[in-house]
Image: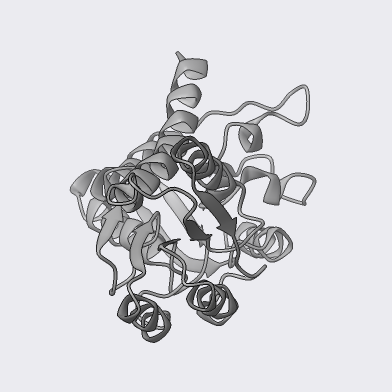
């Protein structure tokens, strides 16, 4: 069952890239050879690498070209050069996972003014024609707390390790985590702090260590990749739970157990 769940999740990510491509290329079937820019949060994000791959599969079959471009940091500024490159190339479409819902809009609107279609995926922006959401936002946020509650026996303190503070999807998930936390069953659980690792493994690992230093911590949520905490001085009693790729959730020691 666990293997099947991971397979479904990985497939869903790939399908998100395919769906974004299909939406962009729906009016391009008669003319092949167009260029579409995929702009992920950053070029190192393993989750979005899979989605970009799905886009490439679909575009190749349709006779179009994909260009993947972004920065190495999760900031709107790091995405601006890629958007400008798409404008200069007169790209037929842009598929973007926004690092900021508004800051990228002036450039995206410039692209739209010359006929470029804009679709957002994973992390929404305020100036697109369509948003491809690979999963239900309330369910993601609420399930994080439900799973963590079970792991912590519904008592103790926990911290959230998120990505960029401006990431639309992460903030939406945290919103529903907080709403779920208001239920009486979680009265003995306390959210003490939200850390923003900016999808940077080193920064996320450092923040994870800081989270482990919270007085009597019993839980921690990882919103990027479990590898960020591997090999770090994390107390053995600390529960780590969150979303990520199957590869990042593999046990790294013989006595380790992946519980959620």
Q: Give left or right: position of 27 versus 163.
A: left
From where the camera sits, is residue 241 visible? no
- Whether residue 88 is situated above or below residue 17 in the rendered picture: below
Which is more toward the observer, 246 or 251? 246
Q: Where is residue 22? Give x, y as percent.
A: 34, 43
Q: Where is residue 5? Give x, y as percent.
A: 44, 22
- Whether residue 76 is situated above or below residue 43 in the rendered picture: below
Which is more toward the observer, 207 or 77? 77
Q: Give left or right: position of 49 versus 37.
A: right
Q: Give left or right: position of 175 versus 81.
A: left
Q: Work out which quarter of the rendered image holds the N terminus and state it.
A: top left
Q: Residue at x 58, y 31 (%)?
A: 246
Q: Where is residue 49? Give x, y as percent.
A: 59, 47
Scheme by which the image is coloured? one colour
Which is more toward the observer, 39 or 33? 33
From where the camera sits, is residue 125 visible? yes
- Whether residue 257 is situated above or below residue 129 in the rendered picture: above
Q: Residue at x 45, y 38 (%)?
A: 58
Which is more toward the observer, 204 or 41? 41
Q: Residue at x 34, y 51 (%)?
A: 28
* Quarter of the image where one finds residue 70: bottom right
Q: Where is residue 37? Give x, y as percent.
A: 50, 61
- Extreme residue in the front direction: 30
- Extreme residue in the top direction: 1
Q: Residue at x 28, y 50 (%)?
A: 137
């Amino acid at each position: 069952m666990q293997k099947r769940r991971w397979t479904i999740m990985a497939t869903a990510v790939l399908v998100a890239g395919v769906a974004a491509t299909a939406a962009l290329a729906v009016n391009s079937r008669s003319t092949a050879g167009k260029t579409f820019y995929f702009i992920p949060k950053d070029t190192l994000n393993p989750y979005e690498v899979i989605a970009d791959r799905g886009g490439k599969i679909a575009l190749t079959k349709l006779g179009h070209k994909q260009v993947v471009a972004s920065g190495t940091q999760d900031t709107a500024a790091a995405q601006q050069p890629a958007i400008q490159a798409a404008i200069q190339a007169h790209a037929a479409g842009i598929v973007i996972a926004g690092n900021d819902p508004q800051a990228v809009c002036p450039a995206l609107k410039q692209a739209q003014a010359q006929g470029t279609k804009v679709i957002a995926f994973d992390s929404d922006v305020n100036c697109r024609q369509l948003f491809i959401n690979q999963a239900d936002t309330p369910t993601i946020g609420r399930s994080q707390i439900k799973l963590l509650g079970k792991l912590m026996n519904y008592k103790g303190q926990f911290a959230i390790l998120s990505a960029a503070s401006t990431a639309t999807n992460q903030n939406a998930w945290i919103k529903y985590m907080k709403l779920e936390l208001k239920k009486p069953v979680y009265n003995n659980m306390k959210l003490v702090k939200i850390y923003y690792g900016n999808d940077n493994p080193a920064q996320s690992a450092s923040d994870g260590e800081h989270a482990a230093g919270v007085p009597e911590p019993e839980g921690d949520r990882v919103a990027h990749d479990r590898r960020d905490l591997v090999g770090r001085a994390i107390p053995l009693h600390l529960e780590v739970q969150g979303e990520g790729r199957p590869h990042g959730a593999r046990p790294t020691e013989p006595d380790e157990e992946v519980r959620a």
